[in-house]
């Protein structure tokens, strides 16, 4: 029986164990550039089998929160090089999560103060995080978006491609495509936020078109074995919904099977909330989702996420339900989470007030076991 603490090869990624650090937004990158302290933060957690960075904007247009990092300028690549260098020095493996927020943004964060972009001009009932002139962070309603013109989509695909290239320049081991949590790609997938009448709206095939065009571009650029993807079939995060998620996401994973990806990362239920959260008439069947992927020939590692504790994660891996399990908040407060899970040691509590923005406190000062 496989254990959470066994090594795993996922595509081109060689992982020391099955414990993954989930992507976690921390808002500590002024001007979208990761600071030296980010190298300390990630290196402290390098005993994870895989580190997935916080969501990282592929372009200025793709940014939706204050002080989140990007991966489209030379200074950002230099900032990330410090992180990858420190993680590799500590023996870790790290991929960067590629992010375009779509409509989850604010005019103050967009190029020339413009409207955020979306599949359709529908405002999300959601909030974003901005920092005011005095440096105080606050959550504020997202701005009304404008619908993307079909001629603009190749430019967005190209931005993803360039970010994947930049990831390799910055010495990342690979990338994770963020197709979850109600951001741009998920806005295209779900019928409530996508009311387009062109080739990118309507049918499931049309709504998934942008996702596959982006994957075509990224995998051509850096090789599919260095690419993972994150999906969240039923999350209501950022005001997305679909009345019939099972056929939609079964279609998505069947399409993923043809690439030879490193992994498929699935948020079960409501992001950061209930794992049995439901959209549509029936509970979502995650086992059926995984079977659809495997039956279509998908060989990537299957990564489960959302509120697993150590025993549940071990059980998921031992039973074959998942190959990898990603932990979020527990990794913020336990840099040595792998050791603590292995020794069944108590975990430090997290301090929610230091999740978004700030400095060292709640970032690099959580204690490890002695
Ligand atoms: C929390 C706060 C801001 C962004 C996600 C990137 O949900 C995020 C995010 C989470 O995927």
Image (cartoon, rainbow, N blue to C red):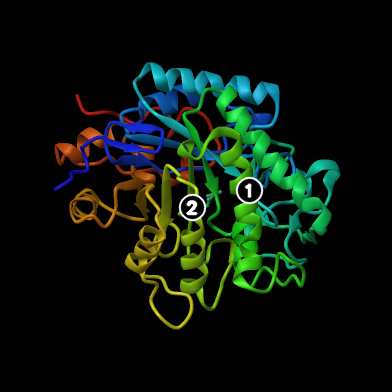
Q: Residue 316: image x %, image y %?
A: 23, 55
Q: Nearer the viewer, residue 268 or 358?
A: 268
Instruction: Read off the residue under disc 1.
Output: 214
Label 1 neighbour load within 10 Å: few <14, some 14-19, many 20+: many
264 left or right of 124? left
Secondary structure under the numbered disc 2 in the rendered image: loop
Q: How many marks?
A: 2
Would you identify the image quadrant in which residue 72 lies? top right
State the CA–CA distance, disc 2 to disc 1: 14 Å
Specify few, some or many for label 2: CA neighbours under 10 Å numbering under 14, 14-19, or 20 or more: some
Which label belongs to residue 258? Answer: 2
Give the residue at x 45% y 45%.
260
Tell me if residue 309 can be seen.
yes
Quarter of the picture containing the C terminus is: top left
Please report the residue visible at 22 percent of the width from the left and 43 percent of the height from the top: 4
Left or right: 251 in relation to 366: right
Query: Nearer the observer, disc 2 or disc 1?
Result: 2
Above-or-below relation of 70 to 2? above
User: Quarter of the image holding residue 42?
Assistant: top left
């Amino acid at each position: 029986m496989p254990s959470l603490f066994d090594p795993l090869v996922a595509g081109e990624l060689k992982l020391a164990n099955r414990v993954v650090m989930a992507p976690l937004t921390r808002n500590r990158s002024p001007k979208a550039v990761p600071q030296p302290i980010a190298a300390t933060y990630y290196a402290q957690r390098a005993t994870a089998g895989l580190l997935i960075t916080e969501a990282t904007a592929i372009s200025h247009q793709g940014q939706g929160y204050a002080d989140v990092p990007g991966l489209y300028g030379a200074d950002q690549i230099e900032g990330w090089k410090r992180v990858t260098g420190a993680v590799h020095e500590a023996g870790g493996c790290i991929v960067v999560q590629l992010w375009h927020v779509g409509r989850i943004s604010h005019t103050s964060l967009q190029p020339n103060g413009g409207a955020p972009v979306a599949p359709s001009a529908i405002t999300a009932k959601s909030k974003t995080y901005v920092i005011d002139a005095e440096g105080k962070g606050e959550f504020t309603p997202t701005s009304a978006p404008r619908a993307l013109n079909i001629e603009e989509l190749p430019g967005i695909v190209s931005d993803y491609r360039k970010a994947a290239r930049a990831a390799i320049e910055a010495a990342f081991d690979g990338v994770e495509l963020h197709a979850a949590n109600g951001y741009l790609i998920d806005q295209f997938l779900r019928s409530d936020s996508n009311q387009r009448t062109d080739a990118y709206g309507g049918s499931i095939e049309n709504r998934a078109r942008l996702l596959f065009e982006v994957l075509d571009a990224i995998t051509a650029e850096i090789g599919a074995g260095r690419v993972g993807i994150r999906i969240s079939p039923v999350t209501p995060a950022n005001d997305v919904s679909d009345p019939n998620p099972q056929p939609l996401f079964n279609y998505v994973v069947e399409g993923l099977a043809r690439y030879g990806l490193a992994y498929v990362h699935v948020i079960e239920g409501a992001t950061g909330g209930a794992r049995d959260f439901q959209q549509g008439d029936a509970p979502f069947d995650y086992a059926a989702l995984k079977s659809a992927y495997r039956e279509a020939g998908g060989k990537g590692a299957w990564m489960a996420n959302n509120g697993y504790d150590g025993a549940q994660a071990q059980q998921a891996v031992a039973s074959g339900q998942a190959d990898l399990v990603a932990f979020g908040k527990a990794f913020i407060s336990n840099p040595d989470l792998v050791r603590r899970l292995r020794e069944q040691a108590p975990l430090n509590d997290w301090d929610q007030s230091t999740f978004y923005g700030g400095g060292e406190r709640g970032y690099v000062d959580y204690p490890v076991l002695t």
